Amino acid sequence: MELVSSAVRWLGIMPRGAASMRREKSLFNALLTHFLMGVALGLTLVLLLGLIDAFHVRDLVAKSDAPVQTTVMLVTTYGLMFGIGAALTGLVLTLEDEG
């Protein structure tokens, strides 16, 4: 019987009338999730800026004195900027939801 109940817990299947056994996310895990989503969004934007040459970012990076360092700086700046912004927004939303 223990094998069946552990499989039920692992699959997330709960019998009717059972209370929800899902634990609440800790604040750190929620903020980390928001931070990583923001970093992914920032990296996507940098990729699109490099691929779509509407603002000539690719030419600016290619004609710089150190194109590798310029690319690294651009990627890290956008990733951290969006990540920190999303983490702060997630903090406000999480604290508002709890309070």
Image (cartoon, grey):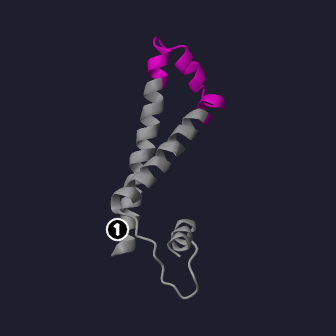
Magenta segment? 48-71
Would residue 63 be found to the left or right of residue 85 on screen? right
In the picture as drawn, the residue positioned furthest to the bottom comes out as 17
- Residue 82 drawn above or below residue 91: above
Across and down, in percent, residue 74 comes to 47, 29
Image quadrant holding the C terminus, namely bottom left
Give the amino acid type for the residue marked by disc 1 in the picture.
Answer: Leu
Instruction: Determine if the magenta segment contains residue 21.
Output: no
- Residue 31 drawn above or below residue 22: above
Would residue 50 be found to the left or right of residue 91 on screen? right
- Residue 16 drawn above or below residue 98: below
Q: Residues within 10 Å of mark 1 (few under 14, many from 20)?
A: few
In the picture as drawn, the residue positioned furthest to the front comes out as 1
Residue that label 1 marks? 95
Would residue 87 be found to the left or right of residue 49 on screen? left
Task: Count the marks.
Answer: 1
Q: Nearer the viewer, residue 21 or 95?
A: 21
Q: What secondary structure is found at the residue carrying circle 1?
A: helix
Residue at 34%, 57% in the rendered image: 28
Across and down, in percent, residue 59 comes to 59, 19
Q: Quadrant of residue 82?
A: top left
Residue at 52%, 43% in the rendered image: 40
Q: Main secondary structure of the magenta part?
A: helix
Q: Nearer the viewer, residue 97 or 64?
A: 97
- Residue 80 drawn above or below residue 15: above
Across and down, in percent, residue 4 comes to 56, 72
Residue at 56%, 39% in the rendered image: 45
